[in-house]
């Protein structure tokens, strides 16, 4: 789905407002003011605040849907595939921190049909992550003590919240990725 340059401006200003004020607290008048428009003019570009949220969710979906095929096509071993998955996930989040932060907090305000669709997409993404973890079992000391669902959920939570714990404005993604793999999968004293 493509949007016009004016709609892109509305989207960007809305993301800033949603982060600062919250989705429910941001009004259409707030958005109109942010893009220097009258409320009536704003409606010639968008139908509702939920349409803006949907654009944002579609952007996130488009970026993250590319990751599993990229990882599948990688010819590397299990560790390289997991590393690429983590790297690309973090890269997408850090390139679009504000939009992703709004997505994480407010996707639940979508209508029921789209909310259901995003839950299904997320479950597919989790299933893909679990398949990567299955391939990592030979590399992990004492894998029987790990519960795959918990491990994958925790790993995704760590990756999703990288902007909250990585202090550097422009971190070295290789360093962050390797740190997650070493500490999370191999313990604080182990390594690949």
Image (spheres, grey):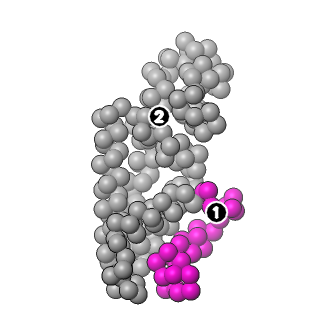
Q: Residue at x 35, y 58 (%)?
A: 125
Residue beneath disc 1? 166
Farthest residue toward the right?
168
User: Looking at the picture, how far across and down is residue 161, in whole percent?
Assistant: 55, 57
Please tell me which of labels 1 and 2 falls first in the chain.
Answer: 2
Q: Nearer the viewer, residue 16 or 24?
A: 24
* Residue 2 seen in the figure: no
Horizontally, residue 20 falls left or right of residue 129, namely right
Q: Residue at x 48, y 39 (%)?
A: 106
Label 2 packing within 10 angstroms: few (<14), some (14-19), many (20+): many
Residue 159 part of the magenta segment = no
Secondary element at image label 1: loop
Q: Is residue 186 above or below residue 46?
A: below
The quarter of the image holding the N terminus is top left
Give residue 53's mark: 2
Q: Is residue 163 above or below residue 51?
A: below
Farthest residue toward the top?
40
Residue 176 part of the magenta segment = yes
User: Looking at the picture, how far across and down is residue 60, in whole percent?
Assistant: 45, 47
């Amino acid at each position: 789905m493509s949007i016009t340059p004016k709609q892109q401006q509305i989207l960007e200003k809305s993301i800033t407002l949603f982060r600062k004020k919250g989705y429910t607290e941001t009004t259409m008048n707030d958005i109109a003011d942010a893009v220097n428009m009258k409320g009536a003019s704003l409606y010639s570009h968008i139908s509702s605040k939920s349409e803006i949220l949907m654009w944002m969710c579609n952007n996130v979906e488009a970026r993250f849907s590319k990751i599993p095929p990229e990882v599948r096509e990688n010819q590397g071993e299990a560790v390289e595939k997991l590393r690429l998955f983590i790297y690309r996930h973090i890269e997408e989040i850090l390139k679009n921190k504000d939009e992703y932060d709004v997505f994480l907090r407010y996707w639940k305000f979508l209508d029921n049909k789209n909310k259901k669709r995003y839950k299904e997409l997320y479950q597919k993404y989790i299933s893909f992550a679990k398949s990567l973890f299955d391939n990592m079992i030979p590399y992990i000391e004492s894998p029987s003590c790990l519960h795959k669902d918990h491990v994958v959920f925790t790993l995704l939570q760590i990756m999703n919240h990288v902007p909250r714990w990585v202090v550097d404005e422009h971190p070295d993604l290789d360093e962050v990725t390797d740190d997650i793999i070493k500490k999370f999968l191999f313990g604080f004293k182990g390594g690949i």
